[in-house]
Image (cartoon, grey):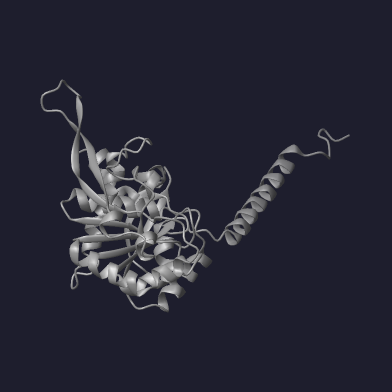
Amino acid sequence: MPETPASPKPLRSTIFGGLIGLMLGIGLAFVRDSLDRRLRDSNEIQEALDLPVVGMVRIEALGNAAYVPNGRGPMTDQDIESFRILRTNLEFLDVDEPITSVLVTSPLPEEGKSTVAASLAAANAAAGKRTLLVECDLRRPSLPERLSINRGPGLSDYLAGQASAGEILQVVTLSQTELSANGGAGAQVEVTAGKLVVIAAGSQSIRPAELLGSQRFRDFLEAVCAAYDAVVIDTPPLLSVSDTLEIVPHVDSILVCIRADQTTRDQARAVKAALAHLPERTTGIVVTGLKPGREHDYGYYSYAYYGED
């Protein structure tokens, strides 16, 4: 009689089971990766659009605005620094021609374009520039709540001839927290960081594309670009409606906000194709929605807060 049973053989079965499970896992991961069209990091985004990345925004900053106390809690110094870097990178995006007007858009909603527009404008104002923030997203305005300003009268009222230029201007006082020179250890005070002029979207309109494509809007844009050092324009998503296409020919630069882990390759290609049919403008990418663990993406500005000699 044999001293060991012919079957089962636990060791052999375990090895075979492990190999089969490993092969199935690799196969499923490959299929999932092939079907998932989302852009994961800044390298994939830059490659898909063939445009330079000029800024990166963490997911914690979305829905907020730099230097503006609006009930959501102050934006962290790390996030504010990312918009200072964006401001500086934008200045060097075209060294031959100074950039005054900047259009901020995204492929689809919820990709952080309003956060980028408001915070970039605030960073410019905090640097001492006469800055105007214009909300041209007449369909889904969000700046009044974010900046604690009135909804109107605004841009749509002015373009419809129902308000004057002076009536639509609102001033937001920017503030930041600094260590107190006279207080105890760790004492902090709120200090004024500058003033930002804002024009809200205004009353709801049934023909926003026509208003933004009108000669009155072009004259308005020309006038404010002559009066301010920087004009930041928050526009609707590029692929959703035609409103933004009406504005692109009349600005100096375009910032396209691409949200990591959300925007797909197909959407990125559609944005690239749409921009190719418009007059060429200096264009850069702002990667938004970066999650914890993506230090290789936004580590270029995190040194100031986490690095040690």
Where residue 112 appears, as percent x and y from the top left, is 41, 52
Where residue 163 appears, as percent x and y from the top left, is 33, 59
Where residue 229 appears, as percent x and y from the top left, is 18, 61
**Quadrant housing the C terminus:** top left
Residue found farthest to the front: 162
Occupied quadrant, residue 232: bottom left
Q: Is 288 in front, or is 23?
A: 288
Does residue 211 appear in this view?
yes
Identify the residue at image location x=64%, y=49%.
Answer: 22
Q: Is residue 183 left or right of residue 174?
A: left
Where residue 273 appears, as percent x and y from the top left, is 46, 75
Q: From the viewer's perspective, is residue 209 above or below residue 82?
A: below
Q: From the viewer's perspective, is residue 176 above or below residue 220?
A: above
Q: Is residue 107 left or right of residue 178?
A: right
Does residue 100 appear in this view?
no
Q: Is residue 31 left or right of residue 277?
A: right
Q: Is 125 in front, or is 287?
A: 125
**Quadrant housing the N terminus:** top right
Q: From the viewer's perspective, is residue 120 above or below residue 220?
A: above
Q: From the viewer's perspective, is residue 246 above or below residue 255?
A: below
Residue found farthest to the top: 184
Q: Is 261 in front, or is 257?
A: 257
Identify the residue at image location x=28%, y=68%.
Answer: 221
Residue found farthest to the left: 182
